[in-house]
Image: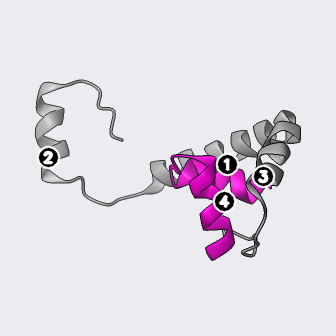
């Protein structure tokens, strides 16, 4: 279930219905594709332990921040231009 939740966030899936379709069609991270009912998926979200997700997310955010700090890829021209005018940028 954790792989499903992380995929939901990481891939910005707009709804549980779409997530259910994806889960039936493709592997999500380490979870194999599986067909489940909409009701079963919704019920599982209601019983998913928030503390487990919180621990994993915090660990993941530390790792992602470290990787971001180590990257040496050049910024796009649009970002370079925006940095001339703005102290901080939020890129989505």
Q: Label 3, on which residue?
A: 41
Q: Secondary structure under badge 4?
A: helix
Q: Is residue 26 visible?
A: no
Q: Which residue is mark 1?
A: 60
Q: CA distance from mark 1 to mark 4?
A: 24 Å
Q: CA distance from mark 3 to mark 1?
A: 24 Å
* Residue numbers of the magenta segment: 1-25
Disc 4 packing (10 Å; few <14; some 14–19; many ≥20): some
Residue 46 or residue 1, whichever sits in front: 46
Considering depth in this image, is 53 or 59 the residue closer to the camera? 53
**Which of the two marks, 2 or 3, is nearer to us in this view?**
3
Q: Residue at x 41, y 57 (%)?
A: 71
78 w.r.t. 26: above or below:
above
Marks 3/4: CA distance?
Answer: 7 Å
Instruction: Estimate the x, y position of residue 78 in percent, counting from the top left.
Output: 14, 46
Residue under pointer 2: 78
Q: Residue at x 74, y 71 (%)?
A: 30
**Of pointers 3 and 1, the one earlier in the residue sequence:** 3
Q: Secondary structure at mark 2?
A: helix
Q: Taking 85 as reference, is 8 left or right?
A: right
- In terms of image quadrants, where is residue 27? bottom right
- Our reading of the magenta stretch's main secondary structure is helix
The residue located at (10%, 40%) in the rendering is 81
The nearer-to-camera label among 1 and 4 is 4
Asked whether the beta carbons under mark 3 and mark 1 sit within 8 Å of each other, the answer is: no
Question: What number is the disc on residue 20?
Answer: 4
- Disc 1 to disc 2, C-alpha distance: 28 Å
> Can you tell which of label 3 and label 1 is closer to the viewer?
3
**Image quarter in which the C terminus is found:** top left
Residue 29, given in percent of the width and then of the height, sits at 67, 68
């Amino acid at each position: 279930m954790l792989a499903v939740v992380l995929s939901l966030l990481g891939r910005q899936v707009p709804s549980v219905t779409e997530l259910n379709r994806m889960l039936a069609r493709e592997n999500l991270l380490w979870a194999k594709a599986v067909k489940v009912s909409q009701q079963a998926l919704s019920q599982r979200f209601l019983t998913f332990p928030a503390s487990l997700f919180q621990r994993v997310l915090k660990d993941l955010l530390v790792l992602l921040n470290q990787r971001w700090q180590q990257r040496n890829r050049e910024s796009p021209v649009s970002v370079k231009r925006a940095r001339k005018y703005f102290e901080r940028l939020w890129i989505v």
